[in-house]
Amino acid sequence: MHFEWTEEQRMLHKMMREFADEVVAPGADERDRTKQFPVEIFRQMAELNLLGLPFPEAYGGAGADYISFAIVVEELSRACASTGITYSAHISLGGAPLALFGTEEQKQRYLTRICTGESMGAFGLTEPGAGSDAGGTQTTAVFEGGEWVLNGSKCFITNASYARFLALTAVTDKQKGTRGITAFIVPTDAPGLTVLDNYEKLGLHSSNTTELIIDNVRVPDENILGKRGEGFKQFMVTLDGGRIGIAAMAVGIAQAAYDRALRYARDRRAFGQSISKFQAIQFKLADMAMQIELARNMVYKAAWMKDNGRKFTKEAAMAKLYASEIAMAATHQAIQIHGGYGYMREYQVERLFRDARLLEIGEGTSEILRTVIAREIGC
Ligand code: COS
């Protein structure tokens, strides 16, 4: 066992650190205020061949591993969590199901466009009545006149306004329960598909999150992703990978909160000394440093298991659960250390606090993740 990055991972980390500090961080606060999607950042990331990072070179990807993906997500999120979630969803929810379950033709047609950035990646699972109970999908697909006709709606869909197509789930065989759910690749300009306006959210303001209305949308049989009836399982497998991305985001946000809190604590003086000299502040910072270290190790372990073809459902759930909870704690304590200034927008820790909150909900709430872990340990 060793704890070293490979040479490629080290170089990627160095590049992403610079990119995050020089390109992503400077406009993060402004984008948060104006809710501006980071289009220019993604244009530059396409040039750096980052938009298909873990996908095979045959489809325009970089053929990198998932630890590399985690490195990129962490660094982006340290600078701007909205950019981090946009990238994480693009790869792990948008591209991954195509790479994992697509036919050769589907990969050539769709995955290649994810890798170039011609389309942002998105996927449609959640519905107004099917969130944690993802098997409660109400959207239907009926085979009619040689085509599938889809009806229903999807909500909280990341990147949908910037996606040319997305994979979404629909019930094809109601009596079969979760085995009657099928995934379809649906172009976002298909007649009958409406992508509604960006939601008003607590945080992650410059990421895109929308609702889809699916009204008699017709797609050919060849647009089934994988096999009929396997959509639920495919999306569960996809979410296992997605949770590594959310966990890496959480580490990035926690790291940013810690960096800012440590800097502030050293600079700020009270009672004749720097507040970093007070044990009350030191203990907060020591806990943050330890928790970030542990969370990052958990992210890397889950990614390593995925890279090595091991089952990683439990490890991804644990990493996502732990990292999201320590990101919340770290951002909370970062505000506390900043005192009144922490509550002000100018110091940016309040943005980190707002952005972190989603991570305990998206891609499996903390409660669902505890359920997943409990099942995996044989409860
Ligand atoms: N990997 C592979 N297969 C999986 C799986 C996984 N991680 N999780 C479930 N499955 C399979 C099961 O093995 C089962 O297969 P069989 O039909 O062959 O028996 C099938 O999928 C149904 O699983 P299960 O019976 O566990 O389904 P439930 O309806 O009980 O749902 C939970 C299970 C709660 C875990 C699931 O609904 C879930 O993850 N919900 C959260 C969804 C989520 O994260 N949404 C956020 C999306 S934000 S983009």
Image (tube, grey):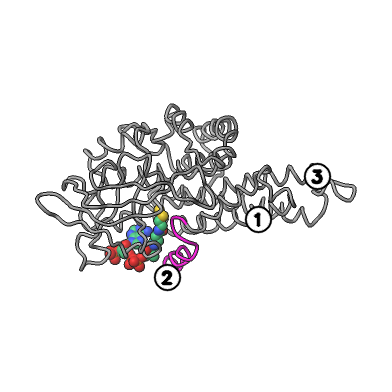
Q: Label 1: which residue?
A: 332
State the image quarter where residue 17 is shown: top right
| Whole-percent x, y for residue 13 in the image | 54, 35
Q: Which of 65 and 149 is in front in this view?
A: 149
The magenta segment is 362-379
Q: How far apart are marks 3 and 2 (CA)?
A: 50 Å
Helix, strand or loop under label 3: loop
Say whether marks 1 and 2 touch (CB < 8 Å). no
- Indicate whether residue 366 is drawn in magenta: yes
Specify the amino acid type for callout 3: Arg
Q: Label 2: which residue?
A: 378
| Whole-percent x, y for residue 227 in the image | 21, 53
Q: Distance between the residues labelled 1 and 3?
A: 18 Å
Sequence-wise, the earlier of marks 1 and 3 is 3
Q: Main secondary structure of the magenta part?
A: helix
Specify few, some or many for label 1: CA neighbours under 10 Å numbering under 14, 14-19, or 20 or more: many
- Indicate whether residue 119 is drawn in magenta: no
| Whole-percent x, y for residue 22 in the image | 59, 30
140 shown above or below 79: below
Sequence-wise, the earlier of marks 1 and 2 is 1
Helix, strand or loop under label 2: loop
Whether residue 25 is visible here, answered yes or no, is yes
Q: Distance between the residues labelled 1 and 2?
A: 34 Å
Whether residue 240 is visible here, answered yes or no, is no
Q: Label 3: which residue?
A: 268
